[in-house]
Amino acid sequence: MVLSSLVNRPNRVYEKQRLVQLSKESITYALPRSRLYVRSYHALFAVGMCGCVYSAYHLIKGKSS
C-alpha cells in the first residue's frame, strides 16, 4: 500500500505532550524544530508584507509623465 508509511506509524502524542508541558520555553518554541518553523514563517511573512507595501507604493505613486 502506498500510504502504509503514513498510516502505520507509532503514536508520539504522549511524548510530545510531555515535552511541551515540561518545557520552560514559550509554547511556540517548545518542540525541537519549532524555532525553524516559526522563524521561516516570520521571514516569509515579512517578505510578503514588503512586496505588498512596495506594490501599493508604486500603484499610489503612479507613472511619472
Image: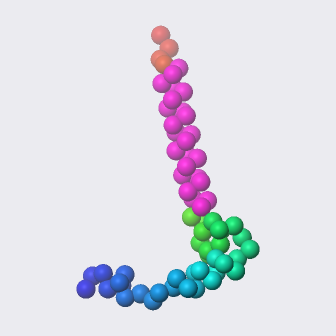
Residue drawn at (54%, 27%) of the image: 57
Pinpoint residue 6: horizontal percent, then vertical percent: 37, 81
Residue with the most extreme left position: 1
Pinpoint residue 23: horizontal percent, then vertical percent: 70, 77
Residue closest to the eye, 17 or 56:
17
Pinpoint residue 13: horizontal percent, then vertical percent: 52, 82
From this view, report whether residue 3 is shown above or below residue 36: below
Task: Residue 40: say if magenta.
Answer: yes
Pinpoint residue 26: horizontal percent, then vertical percent: 69, 67
Residue 7 visible (yes or no): yes
Rendering colour mode? rainbow
Residue 35 visible (yes or no): no
Residue drawn at (59%, 72%) of the image: 33
The quarter of the picture where the N terminus appears is bottom left
User: What span is colored magenta in the figure?
Assistant: 38-61
Task: Residue 47: say if magenta.
Answer: yes
From this view, report whether residue 21 is shown above or below residue 57: below
Residue drawn at (47%, 17%) of the image: 63
From this view, report whether residue 48 is shown above or below residue 12: above
Give the quarter of the image for residue 14. Answer: bottom right
Residue with the most extreme right position: 24
Residue drawn at (58%, 81%) of the image: 16
Residue closest to the eye, 64 or 13:
13
From this view, report whether residue 63 is shown above or below residue 43: above
Q: Magenta region, mostly helix, strand or loop?
A: helix
| Tally of marks | 0
